[in-house]
Image (tube, rainbow, N blue to C red):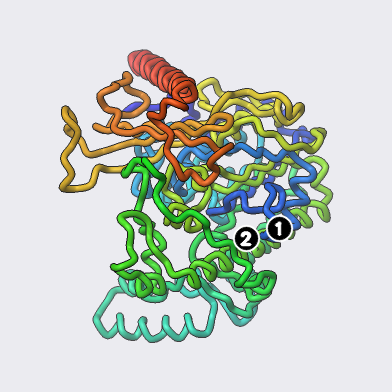
Amino acid sequence: MLRNIFIALSAVPLMLAVPADVLAQKKRPNILFIAIDDLKPEIGAYGSRMVKTPNIDRLAASGTVFMANYCQQAVCGPTRASLMTGMRPDHTKVYNMEVRMRNLNPGILTLPQHLWAQGYSTQGIGKVYDPRCVDEDIDKPSWSVPYYKTEDRYYARGFGEPVTGRYQSVAARQEAERYTKEAQAQGMSKQQVRQYLMDKVKPSVENADVPDNAYNDGANVLQAIDILGGLAKGDAPFFFAVGLAKPHLPFVAPKKYWDLYRREDMPVAKYQLMSKGGVDVSMHNSGEIRSYTDIAPLIRPETEKPYGVTIPEDKQRELLHGYFAAISYTDANVGRLLKALDSLGLRENTIVVLWGDHGWHLGDHNLWCKHSTFEQATRTPLIISAPGIRPSQTRSHSEFVDIFPTLCELTGSPIPGHLHGRSQVAVMKDPSKKVKDFSVSQYPRAIAKGTTLPAGHTSSKVMGYALRSGRYRYTVWMGNDWKSDMPFDASALIGQELYDYDTDPEERVNLAGSKANAAAQADMHAKMMSYFAEARSRSVAMKATSAGSSGR
């Protein structure tokens, strides 16, 4: 197994190696790092006229809003692994929630780990990494103090921890009590009982008249504010990561946030079909939302399509209502964090980074959730507010792998040479500039069982690489388990997509192969080949360096 030779094997020795005068510099900027689960750019700062996000909008008004930011893979664990390490999925090898990042890359370097080595206190609470993709300490090498767990005292009085970590309604508690007795009567273990509840008490939405801190995010933010108070008294600059779980499914939020919207105003997706001429493997069956107990009874065989999930319009409106309510609830929690920064006198010397880990399908293409290479799944919000940099919007391309080097430059920390991203500080200072011509996302698929494999293929594994540049998205679907760190193999190509967002923002027609768009496709294909060549070259260089290092 290859090891990343650029990594600190132990953060503590690195920490001790930092000169005392650096450790004493309180003027180095702090970082408040706000991770939001399943938040697409459906916020005011990105042009939404529907969703109410006054606090995030105020943050945007003081920072750089990256209008063309894209994730590396549209699902929680892989995209967070890439963001936190500055390395693309084909290096981290985290393509799903079944792989722990350091099992495959024992020495991989993370952003907080690197900053710890530069004299920062690094702390975190909530969902920053996906916990399934790291160790039980939420990646122990990343944190200068043990990762915080939600303390009971921060929940609203009389509530306690939500049912299965999600629900607070009376109905949910009654169901939980009934199913617990049922499971215990069957002789299930404590762990089996919990899983039984997770499967049985699982509505897709909840509108409950409860305090904000009845749910996990509200409790975590109150605890985070106390942690900030302690960090404000410390001598070292800090990197403090706060992860917010909403608007991830289920769409639960206190009633007052549901009351901000009218169900009849919900914008049901106009185009709920597969793209004309699209590639079958680009689609999925919206399996995540199908698992919710109030969705399955609504699915009718006579209306089902071979892709996505067909949900009645009234339920679509309820889901949209819930998603928007959960966003506004998240916005309120962001507002509390920003208010705490101000009240503690930290705002002027703190970089605030806010990001949503990927986009989300809301019925477009008949898809729900993420898990694709389309625009709605891959485009993500990214806002960075840094001391001394004027607020702006930029349409220059950026990616999550760029966050690591960007924060290094903003804090005066060395930028590790192995990172796949590029610092966006030049763009923050002058939004008319750009540091890259395109962004790349990817997503794994498999050729369906019973389907004949393409000639010469021995594997059903497929990877889609989507390159977004200017007005176009170009996606190549590579079969036979081909990855970008391998020599390019044209025979592995099983499908191509080309979308023009100037004329077709809903991706209704796949233009790949069209004579009228041959020049655009050729240009995008050349960019993709350039990306693959760079990825291959980087992989070869890292393997050579690693082999040389291990031979010493």
Image height of 525 relative to 115, above or below: above
- Residue carrying label 1: 53
Residue 288 or 190: which is nearer the viewer? 288
Distance of mark 1 from mark 2, alpha carbons?
A: 7 Å
SS at badge 1: loop
Residue at 27%, 85% in the rendered image = 185
Place residue 398 in its image quadrant.
top right
**Does 550 sit left or right of 422 as displayed?**
left
Residue 362: give x, y in percent of width and height.
50, 57
In the rendered image, is residue 223 in sight? no
Residue at 71%, 58% in the rendered image = 53
The quarter of the rendered structure image containing the N terminus is top left
Residue 332 or 380: which is nearer the viewer? 380
Residue at 77%, 37% in the rendered image = 392
Residue at 55%, 59% in the rendered image = 245
Residue type for callout 2: Ile
SS at badge 2: helix
Residue 226: give x, y in percent of width and height.
71, 59
Residue type for callout 1: Thr
In the rendered image, is residue 503 in sight? yes
Residue 95: give x, y in percent of width and height.
37, 41
Residue 88 or 181: which is nearer the viewer? 88
- Residue carrying label 2: 327
Say if mark 1 contacts mark 2, CB within 8 Å: yes
Place residue 17 in its image quadrant.
top right
